[in-house]
Image: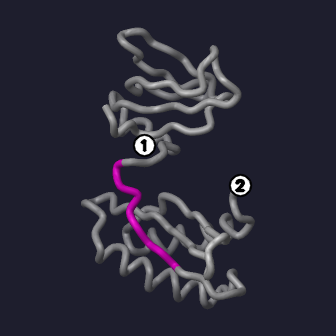
Amino acid sequence: MTHPLVPKIIDLAKPVAQELGLELVGVVFHTNQSPPILRVDIRNPEQDTGLDDCERMSRALEASLDVAEIIPDAYTLEISSPGISRQLTTDREFISFKGFPVIISTSPAYEGQQEWRGKLISRDETAVYLNKKGRTVAISCSHITQVLLDESS
């Protein structure tokens, strides 16, 4: 379950990233750690995301978070790049990774399976389409819990 502060943090972090020429990919707040860890994933759309990008985002976001006083207690801020192994969520990602091997997790099971592997064809409002050994499979979006790039293929 997403921490209730995450939407506020996203609203604050998105314009900070855009100002730096970066994209906000994801935010996770791990409150089960001591101190809690706020992990923010960014991407540089112009080139490979580097340490310099993470440092610039860290400084800028830390200053914005301090001013906004969204997080009342001590925490650790981690800025990183999600790398290639990640969940696909945006239309842009589904277009960029067309033809790549993916793993789709479903809940409840869809047509008797909870995990589907194949090459990504596309996604629309109703389904994600996979090429599974030459056959097109449509998996209903209402059953999909996540779509991950498959590094094992």
Find residue 6 and report its horizontal and vertical position in percent.
66, 66
State the residue at coordinates (36%, 30%): 101
Question: Residue 66: where, in percent of width, then height?
Answer: 60, 89
Residue that badge 2 annotates: 1
131 vs 1, nearest the viewer: 1
Tell me whether the residue at label 1 lies in contact with that at label 2, contact meaning CB atoms closer than 8 angstroms. Answer: no
The correct choice, above or below, for 108 with respect to 11 in the image is above
152 or 79, which is in the foreground? 152
For the residues marked 1 and 2, what is the alpha-carbon distance in whole angstroms? Answer: 23 Å
Helix, strand or loop at mark 2:
loop
Disc 1 element: helix
Could you tell which of marks 1 and 2 lies nearer the N-terminus?
Answer: 2
Crowd class of label 1 (few under 14; some 14 to 19; many from 20; radius 10 Å): few
| Most foreground residue, 111 or 4 | 111
Query: Residue at 70% across / 27% down in the picture?
Result: 108
Which residue appears farthest toward the left when viewing the image? 47
Q: Amino acid at mark 2?
A: Met
Quadrant location of the N terminus? Answer: bottom right
Residue 75: name its quadrant: bottom right
Q: Amino acid at mark 1?
A: Glu
Q: Is residue 25 above or below residue 70?
A: above
Residue matched to label 1: 93
Q: Which region of the structure is painted magenta? A: 77-84
Q: Position of residue 116 (x, y in %)?
A: 50, 24
